[in-house]
Amino acid sequence: MASYTSDDCTGLLAFWADIDDPDYVLRYQQWHNCEHIPERVLTEGFIQGQRYRSLDNRPHFLMFYDTKTPAVLTSDAYMTTLRNPTPWTREALAHFRDPVRDIFQRLAVAGRPGKLAAPYVTSLRFDLSEPVDEERYVGRWLEAVTAVASVSRARLYKADAAMGNAANAENRFHGGGPGTQAYLALIEESLPPEEASDPVKAGDAALEGDVGRVDEECNRYWLEVVHTKAEMA
């Protein structure tokens, strides 16, 4: 039987945060690499965990986890880990600043993941001025994004507000909650922005007019770490 991969996953837990003290960044990375991502990925229904750092190298990070379905993120197994944060987790989360934590349902995917985790990722968070615009993003926009030579895969997600607002023990330590935007596009790239065409602009050009995005936040990152669980489907 084939292994379950991130391409099969329809759930996503994403976390954006700054680290408050530059001297704590290495300690944070050690915690996330050696304890936290492994703990999460070993939880039933989690398949992969990754962390990316802002391309300007400030201490701003994007952390995300692919899950089989969004329901995994309200499962008893996951809730147990949230209710029992380790001492190191409590320490690390206290250094998070301006954290945003969202649970997403995948709406669409275009392209295929590369043989290795993408070295660069664009995170585009946004709302839409008109609900009908969602169909344009699921279709033409994603297709145009993945037509860019440096893009291997692009995924479009919609936040699950009810799941994201559910209280958990870790919230007490980082103080974060859901973002204000409903949509997330994750664009996986093989080259840094200065060496490639802009995939967001390519997608927008395919819409031929008003792109319909409001409250937009676009950030670009480079890969720091990835852990993947080989699990039989």
Image: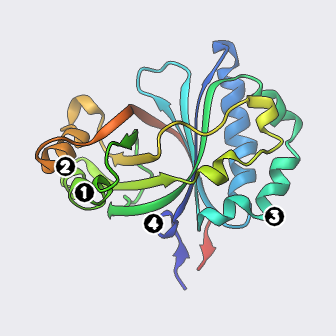
User: Residue 194: x, y in percent?
Assistant: 23, 28
Q: Are discs 2 and 4 less than 8 Å apart at CB? A: no
Q: Are discs 4 and 3 less than 8 Å apart at CB? A: no
Q: Earlier in the sequence, mark 4 or mark 1?
A: 4
User: Residue 106: x, y in percent?
Assistant: 46, 61
Residue on which the image places disc 2 = 148
Residue drawn at x 69%, y 28% is 28
Q: Amino acid at mark 1?
A: Arg
Choose mark 3 or mark 1, whichever is in front. Answer: 1
C-alpha separation, residue under disc 3 versus residue under disc 1: 36 Å
C-alpha separation, residue under disc 3 versus residue under disc 2: 41 Å
Image quadrant containing the N terminus: bottom right
Q: Are discs 2 and 1 less than 8 Å apart at CB? A: no
C-alpha separation, residue under disc 2 versus residue under disc 4: 19 Å
User: Residue 11: x, y in percent?
Assistant: 56, 61
Q: Earlier in the sequence, mark 4 or mark 3?
A: 4
Can you say whether 50 is above or below 22 in the image? below
The residue lying furthest to the front in this view is 130
Residue drawn at x 63%, y 14% is 22
Residue on which the image places disc 3 = 76
Residue on which the image places disc 1 = 136
Choose mark 3 or mark 2, whichever is in front. Answer: 3
Secondary-structure class at tag 3: helix
Q: Earlier in the sequence, mark 3 or mark 2?
A: 3
Q: Amino acid at mark 4?
A: Asp
Q: Which mark is residue 7?
A: 4
Choose mark 2 or mark 1, whichever is in front. Answer: 1
Q: Amino acid at mark 2?
A: Val
Q: Amino acid at mark 3?
A: Asp
